Amino acid sequence: MRRLYLQIYVAFLGIVLLLGVLVTLSWWLAPAPWHDRRMFEGLAALVAESLPGPGQPTALLLERVEELARRFNADLAVRGPDGALLAAAGRPLPAQPPELNASGWFRSRGRSIAALKLPDGRWVLAHGQNPRPAAGLLITLAAAAAVVALGAYPLARRITGRLERLQTRVEALGAGVLTTRVEVEGADEVASLARSFNHAADRIQALVAAQKTLLASVSHELRTPLTRIRMAVELLPADTRPELRARMARDVAELDGLIGELLLASRLDTVEPLAQPEDVDLLALLAEEAAENGAEVAGEPTLIQGDPRLLRRLIRNLLVNANRHAEGAPVEASLGPLAGGGARLSVADRGPGVPEAERERIFEPFYRPPGPRSSGEGVGLGLALVRQIARRHGGEARCMPREGGGTCFVVDLRGVHPPASPPAP
């Protein structure tokens, strides 16, 4: 099995070996400077034999220096033991530094200059005019960098490309598209991760399907005895403990509503995006529900794409919740457009309010805060459904304090669009 770390190691090893070959070729082909002291002394002796002695005419020295400069294609200068310039050819060269007491190299203004101390005490300074060795080294280094870049890019892109595709599928699965799978490419760790993802997605899809089947079966089994109980209550004589009949009827209705809300919450958690969203007039829905719940409505007509039944349930749950805690004060509902598209729905009451620490927790299923707001009817699913429906419509639900006392629930709805085809594995 091809392991990912082996692929990376072999590729890196190949790049290093290639770089070593290039550096070796560069070192082999490019002339290297002489650093051996005996070599310098030998060169100094040969140059001394080629030059006229100290007592010879200056013109003869200059002629010989120019000839050597032409042969070696270099800048040359001959200086006396005291540093005085005796003859030169080519570009001017600086005097050797005082601390240089033997043949060797020194640098001046970015140039490497060879200094040969002749047996008679004179100095010969030389600098090659041909820049090809340095240029060749730079070209070799640039070629080596290009080889490293070209060798590393395909491997890195292959690995990161597969990881990016895997990330896209993970995000799709997290968004609720349970049919998402990843194509298994290769036989390394990334491929193993893709197989693990597909296995986990299969398990999640099977578990969700089993949960939906279980909830549907349980709801059917529970509603059957509830129907019998409701019929039995209705068949009781009207004069038989009317308060008991009313309490039993309320309990049956509450259980029936709980089953419906459980099924809706499960569906919102597991189903894929809406297949065919419709244009929904939120102000019309708000006015209808407000008329049934005795709330005041303000705003302007606003259309969004969505599911009218879910949006009606969202509005109804907000109004019912506000009426439950309004303590007799009127509930105020308003609707307005959002910048960039969508609508903002606000439902406010003058109840006791929600402590800041509880404003997020009240959206959790079955959570009922302590204090006055926990009294009354309800099982703690209404606001959880509000947030789920809002998120299914590209928005969010928030609980905020109301100026002057009370609570204001603000729901932003951006709308939904028909889903695109599921990403291909």
Image (cartoon, rainbow, N blue to C red):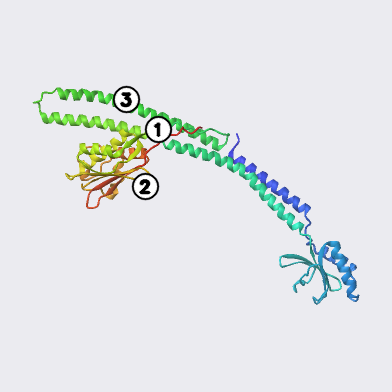
Q: Is residue 170 visible?
A: yes
Image quadrant assignment for residue 392: top left
User: In the image, what residue type sits under mark 2?
Assistant: Ala
Q: Amino acid at mark 3?
A: Ser
Residue at 76%, 57% (x, y): give it: 133
- The local crowd at label 3, few if under 14, some if 14 to 19, many if 20 or more residues have their Cα within 10 Å, is few
Please tell me which residue is depicted at 90% across the width and 75% down the height of the picture. Answer: 57
From the viewer's perspective, tell me whether residue 195 is left or right of residue 61.
left
Q: Are marks 1 and 2 in contact (CB under 8 Å)?
A: no
State the separation of the CA atoms marked 1 and 2.
Answer: 27 Å
Residue bearing mark 2: 339
67 versus 303 height, above or below? below
Left or right of 302 on screen, residue 192: right
Residue 294, how many percent across, how many down?
19, 40
Q: Are marks 3 and 2 in contact (CB under 8 Å)?
A: no
Nearer the observer, 211 or 331: 331
Residue 128: percent from left, percent from top: 79, 62
Query: What amino acid is found at the position of numbered circle 1 in the picture?
Result: Glu
Label annotation for residue 188: none
Secondary structure found at label 3: helix
Q: CA distance from mark 1 to mark 3?
A: 21 Å
Q: Position of residue 100 (x, y in %)?
A: 76, 71
Mark 3 against mark 2, which lies toward the viewer? 2
Residue 272: quadrant of the picture:
top left
The residue that disc 1 covers is: 272
Percent coordinates x, y for residue 240 in the rendering: 9, 26
Give SS at disc 1: loop
Marks 1 and 2, the one that precedes in the sequence: 1
Question: How many tags in the picture?
Answer: 3
Of labels 1 and 3, earlier in sequence is: 3
Residue denoted by label 3:
217
